[in-house]
Image (cartoon, rainbow, N blue to C red):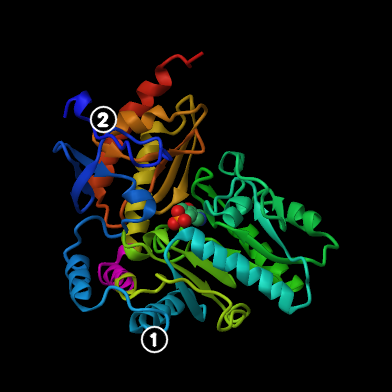
Amino acid sequence: MSATAQPTSPHVMNTYGRLPIALSHGQGCRVWDTAGKAYLDGLGGIAVNTLGHNHPELVPALQDQLTKLIHSSNYYHVTGQEQLATKLTEISGLTNAFFCCTGLEANEAALKLARKYGHDKGIERPEIVVYEAAFHGRSIATLSATGNPKVQAGFGPLVEGFIRVPLNDIEALKKATEGNPNVVAVFFETIQGEGGINPMRWEYLKQVRQLCDERDWLMMIDEVQCGMGRTGKWFAHQWAGIKPDVMPLAKGLGSGVPIGAVVAGPKAANIFGPGNHGTTFGGNPLAMRAGVETIRIMEEHKLLENAATVGAHLKAALERELGGLPGVKEIRGQGLMIGIELDRPCGVILNRACDAGLLLSVTADKVIRLVPPLILSIAEADEIVAILAPIVKAFLSEPAPQ
Ligand SMILES: *Cc1c(COP(=O)(O)O)cnc(C)c1O
């Protein structure tokens, strides 16, 4: 496709800095654009396409569901909700789920749970602890919880009732909440995604769990990006051997079909009653089928193990190629959620990788992010490194722009 024939969007709101390509179809970890060029998918639609593209078991299941029922209504029982909720409680050790359509909606539900948890205890102005560099979504409440001024700029007044603390610092958390009777919850991502692949340390997670128990706070873990098998366990916090009280999910849960969920344990499972919360599309039969089949296929094909093994291989290979180079600060992450932090803004790597046939993203200005489908093979991981390493090396050898 010539430069003049690049797709444009004169009637679509200009909310994204888009690359000049449009994807037309995919197979496994590969996608093709409308001009016929192939790409290796290191992004998975931002940690969404768990099973890659055109999965031979998912697609027929969704086709079957389309012929039966796409949407009914939450006026009625939805069989798929019961099936998916049962499965989610089984793999999380929690007890109840509410279904919605996106990550921010799952987080809104969590924030409402926390506030009502407070009100039910007689706390009139509940406050929720959130973190620096966090990302929780683009609604007014979730952008207020987000720790990124760029996401908030232009949208004030922000929602009040948030206390912000740094990551991995239990003393800072204690100090920020000292003597405050209005605190009801601590809310964070186990591994921050948009914030630059920043993991909470396992030891810290245990300390926060203990503090939440002592103070009767809800521990609310946003696993929208790091959950659903991406790190090699169903949920990233499980590496620390702890359980949250509230866990929002979305992204990878439906392998591309829009779906969100908030999963709750005993402390939070009965906070909402009829009339307290709802959504028209949430929990519809098509989305539920996508969630149920995604988990079934993940189990059948041992994709947690695959994410752990291939992720470790990918990280080690990146480490070998790039680790210790001047300009490479750190290569971090778990399973198939990997960030390469450089010492300078590197947005241009996104374009260069795309030109070279590799999809990825750059987040927090300086972090190259890889969140490929969980079906990624060792050979495909090697291919990612073979494409990406020379691009990063060339980029780092250029004089810094003035
Ligand atoms: C993507 C993301 C969200 C927002 O999800 P949407 O579906 O875009 O609303 C929330 N939290 C985390 C951790 C995310 O990565």
For this view, does 209 lie left or right of residue 171? left
Please tell me whether residue 36 is drawn above or below residue 147 in the rendered image.
Answer: above
Is ligand 1 within 8 Å of the beta carbon of the residue shown at mark 2? Answer: no
For this view, does 140 lie left or right of residue 331? right
Magenta stretch, residue numbers: 290-303
For this view, does 197 lie left or right of residue 112? left
Q: Residues within 10 Å of mark 1 (few under 14, many from 20)?
A: few
User: Magenta stretch: residue 3 in it?
Assistant: no
Which quarter shows the N terminus?
A: top left
Mark 2 is on which residue type? Answer: Asp
Q: Hey, which residue is sitting farthest left in the picture?
A: 36
Q: Quadrant of residue 252?
A: bottom left
List x then y, in percent, for residue 117: 68, 75
- Can residue 240 be spotted in the picture? no
Instruction: Residue at 65%, 45% (x, y): give it.
Output: 156
Q: Which mark is residue 77?
A: 1
List x then y, in percent, for residue 358: 27, 38
285 and 366: which one is in front?
Answer: 285
